[in-house]
Image: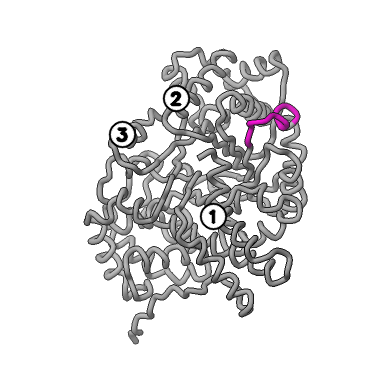
């Protein structure tokens, strides 16, 4: 029996409270922020898109292949990543018709019911491509053809979409080994779009990173420094940070397994570094080296003004076989219990009271919101809370973040929203979700007479626009 396709609609009150009084307040608040420019100060879009401005290939390459939120769900239900055309670790790919991969996805669209991915993608389907029937096996080919045809037109090239989405600024994230050629091309092109980079030194800081030995050698060749000597190694970082800043960077980013920091003497740091570069570090020594390098990066931020971000608490590449076959960032990263109070103390003892230093901390351990992170951010002038991140980047997670951090940190020791995405077309949807949730949360405070509506309006605008610009020095 064939069922008629269901309509695809975006309800104007989605994510607003069911209580009519609060819903009316949320509507008014949202009307004040919905047209604000998008500030995307941290993410993982490809700068080549904006440098080359070539058409995206097809629906699968744009919306399925880069999005680990999507293909991890499919993998969990037994779909082979080869069948989706996901690139392997060696750069090869299975010979898969992208239409067939899209059909596999569409046939399993029901798996995404109620998830953030369904909200983001329905927003993309409806508002970006004008589709009006729900994705399903029956509509898979129509979706594929409509999206793929649109992508070949000038209006759907990366720069045109950037402007259509009202993006004021977007930051990408690059390794210190990246020559930043695409960023240079963007700057020299005369295009008005503002695309910045961010310094992510994990491959040359983490001794347990699979690229570390080769990356360290490349680091030395690129900088001309003796990176096997502690002093030369630190000089190399300073050199590359300056290079990134010259290409627009205002921040660094660090994705460590924990938030451990250390403040070793110079002699002890040198001895530890010598052990690391010999490849003789134990897991405990590798952790200590990462901890020391967070403090070293913080000290460098005092000199060059780059805002420091830490994204800790993740067991990356948990699926050994998947990692061996497909490499990093394939949906097998799992949150870990994370300590912040003790872990951050060495760094904060060293630089936590220094004016001009900004540290933005994220977490995948929600149990730390009220117990650790909000009280820390509510005390240290340098410390700000990044928004609900990754597994918690959902309406429920955003609400829990606000609910548990408000008492100690308030709104103004947080940095608003950033989308942290590789999925370019989902950016407007993600920011819309965050703005709606914040307006719903503020509406509750207004209805309970905890703040006045004019105050809630100002906070909503700050969270959506002003705070990320201020925090990231944009």
Judging by the rendered image, the residue that carries numbered circle 2 is: 243
In the rendered image, is residue 78 in sight?
no
Name the residue rendered at 37%, 46% in the picture.
Answer: 87
Closer to viewer: mark 1 or mark 2? 1
Q: Which mark is residue 464?
A: 1
User: CA gap, disc 2 to disc 3?
Assistant: 15 Å
Closer to viewer: mark 1 or mark 3? 1
Q: Marks 3 and 1: in contact by CB < 8 Å?
A: no
Along the polypeptide, which appears first: circle 2 or circle 3?
Answer: 3
Dot 3, how many residues are within 10 Å of its Cα: few (below 14), some (14-19), or many (20+)? some
Name the residue rendered at 68%, 68% in the picture.
Answer: 446
Task: Give the side of residue 152 with respect to residue 448, left or right.
Answer: left
Dot 2, how many residues are within 10 Å of its Cα: few (below 14), some (14-19), or many (20+)? some
Q: Which residues are magenta?
A: 349-358
In the rendered image, is residue 185 in sight?
yes
Residue 376, picture quadrant: top right
Q: Marks 2 and 1: in contact by CB < 8 Å?
A: no
Q: Residue 184 in the image: state x and y as whole percent.
A: 34, 31
Name the residue rendered at 73%, 49% in the picture.
Answer: 374
SS at badge 3? helix
Q: Main secondary structure of the magenta part?
A: loop
Q: What count of labels does the image hold?
A: 3
Scheme of image coloration: one colour
Q: Residue 357 in the image: state x and y as whole percent.
A: 64, 32
Q: Nearer the viewer, residue 360 or 108?
A: 360
Along the polypeptide, which appears first: circle 1 or circle 3?
Answer: 3
Q: Nearer the viewer, residue 364 or 246?
A: 246
Dot 1, how many residues are within 10 Å of its Cα: few (below 14), some (14-19), or many (20+)? many
SS at badge 2? helix
- Image quadrant holding the N terminus, namely bottom left
Judging by the rendered image, the residue that carries numbered circle 3 is: 185
């Amino acid at each position: 029996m064939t069922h008629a396709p269901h309509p695809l609609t975006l309800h104007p009150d989605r994510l607003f409270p069911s209580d009519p009084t609060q819903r009316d307040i949320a509507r008014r608040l949202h009307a004040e922020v919905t047209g604000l420019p998008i500030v995307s100060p941290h993410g993982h879009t490809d700068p080549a898109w904006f440098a080359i401005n070539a058409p995206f290939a097809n629906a699968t390459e744009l919306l399925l292949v880069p999005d680990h939120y999507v293909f991890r769900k499919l993998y969990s239900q037994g779909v082979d990543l080869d069948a989706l055309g996901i690139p392997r670790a060696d750069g090869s790919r299975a010979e898969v018709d992208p239409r067939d991969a899209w059909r596999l996805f569409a046939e399993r669209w029901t798996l995404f019911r109620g998830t953030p991915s369904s909200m983001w993608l329905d927003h993309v389907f409806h508002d970006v491509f004008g589709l009006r029937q729900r994705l399903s096996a029956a509509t898979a080919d129509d979706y594929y053809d409509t999206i793929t045809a649109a992508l070949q037109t000038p209006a759907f090239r990366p720069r045109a979409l950037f402007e259509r989405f009202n993006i004021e600024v977007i930051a990408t994230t690059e390794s210190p080994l990246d020559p930043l050629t695409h960023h240079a091309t963007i700057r020299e092109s005369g295009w008005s779009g503002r695309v910045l980079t961010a310094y992510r030194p994990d491959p040359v800081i983490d001794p347990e990173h699979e690229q570390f030995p080769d990356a360290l050698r490349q680091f030395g060749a690129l900088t001309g420094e003796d990176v096997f000597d502690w002093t030369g190694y630190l000089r190399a970082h300073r050199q590359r940070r300056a290079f990134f800043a010259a290409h627009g960077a205002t921040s660094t980013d660090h994705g460590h397994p924990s938030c451990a920091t250390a403040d070793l003497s110079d002699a002890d740091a040198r001895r530890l570094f010598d052990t690391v570069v010999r490849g003789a570090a134990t897991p405990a020594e590798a952790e200590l080296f990462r901890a020391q390098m967070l403090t070293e990066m913080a000290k460098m931020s005092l000199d060059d003004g780059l805002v420091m971000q830490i994204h800790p608490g993740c067991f990356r590449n948990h699926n050994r076989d998947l990692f061996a076959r497909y490499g990093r960032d394939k949906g097998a990263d799992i949150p870990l219990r994370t300590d912040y109070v003790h872990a951050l103390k060495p760094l904060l003892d060293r630089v936590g009271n220094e004016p001009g230093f900004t540290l933005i901390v994220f977490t995948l351990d929600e149990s730390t919101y009220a117990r650790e992170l909000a009280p820390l951010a509510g005390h240290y002038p340098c410390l700000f809370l990044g928004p609900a991140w990754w597994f918690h980047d959902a309406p429920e997670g955003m609400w829990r973040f606000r609910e548990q951090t408000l008492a100690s940190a308030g709104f103004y020791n947080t940095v608003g929203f950033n989308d942290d995405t590789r999925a370019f077309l989902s950016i407007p949807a993600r920011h819309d979700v965050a703005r709606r949730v914040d307006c719903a949360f503020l509406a509750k405070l207004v209805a309970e007479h905890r703040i006045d509506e004019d105050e809630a309006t100002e906070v909503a605008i700050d969270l959506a626009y002003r705070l990320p610009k201020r925090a990231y020095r944009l």
